[in-house]
Image (cartoon, grey):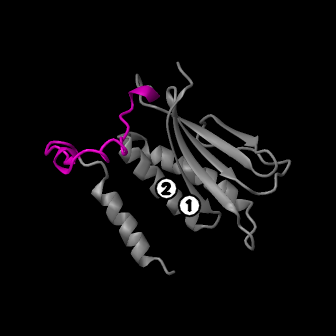
Amino acid sequence: MSSHTAQVDDIRLVAMPSALNCASMFVEFSLTEWQLPMLRDTTSEAARALVQNVLDHADDKNPGFVNVRLRLKGDCLVIEVEDDQLARAHDEAPVIDGRRTGAVPVQGRGKLVWCEVPLPPGMSATQVRLPHRGERRNLPPEAAAPPAEQPQSVDPALADRVLVGLKNREW
């Protein structure tokens, strides 16, 4: 199986409690775009566990940042969470439902923890249908219109949850 990365998506968040819900929404949105809805719950839970691990060690007065990255690679989806906190000797990857996890120190400051979620049987990263965002920018308006039979690329319920969450957020 190839270890070539077929697709990657990431988001940078402040290492505060709100990062948990933002990471979950990011995972759900990315997997909806990649048409992998069967992995949403498992991947979202794993991402939350990895982000929670960072938050458990974050300095409340100077929280820093956390990068959440999803990578389609080989026959799995890899969730990577990178922080910029001072490295500590006892930092290890959290155990997540018996899944393969790991931790690697980042040069200078921080660490990267990861968790692998297997793709459905018989599927590899190169077979996942990926969005082509840049393809349509140069097309004339009539050619850029999506066909009537094309499925929606974003789950409307997810978009509603994001908008309601933003509306209820106290800035």
User: How far apart in space, not on screen, are marks 1 and 2 (Cα)?
Assistant: 6 Å
Q: Nearer the viewer, residue 32 or 94?
A: 32
- Residue drawn at x 20%, y 46% is 146
Residue bounds of the magenta highlight: 125-151
Q: Position of residue 137 (x, y in %)?
A: 32, 48
Residue at the left extreme, as displayed? 148
What amino acid does circle 1 point to?
Answer: Leu
Judge left or right: residue 26 versus residue 32. right
Number of marks in the rendered image: 2
Q: Could you classify mark 2 by the number of other residues whose Cα lies within 10 Å: few (under 14), some (14-19), or many (20 or more)?
A: many
Q: Determine whether 120 is above or below 22 in the image.
A: above
Q: Is residue 29 magenta?
A: no
Q: Is residue 147 magenta?
A: yes
Toward which corner of the image does residue 139 lie, by quadrant? top left
Location of mark 2 (residue)? 24
- Residue drawn at x 51%, y 61% is 22
Q: Determine whether 68 is above or below 76 in the image.
A: below
Location of mark 1 (residue)? 20
Residue at the bottom extreme, as displayed? 170
Toward which corner of the image does residue 19 lie, by quadrant? bottom right
Q: Determine whether 101 is above or below 16 in the image.
A: above
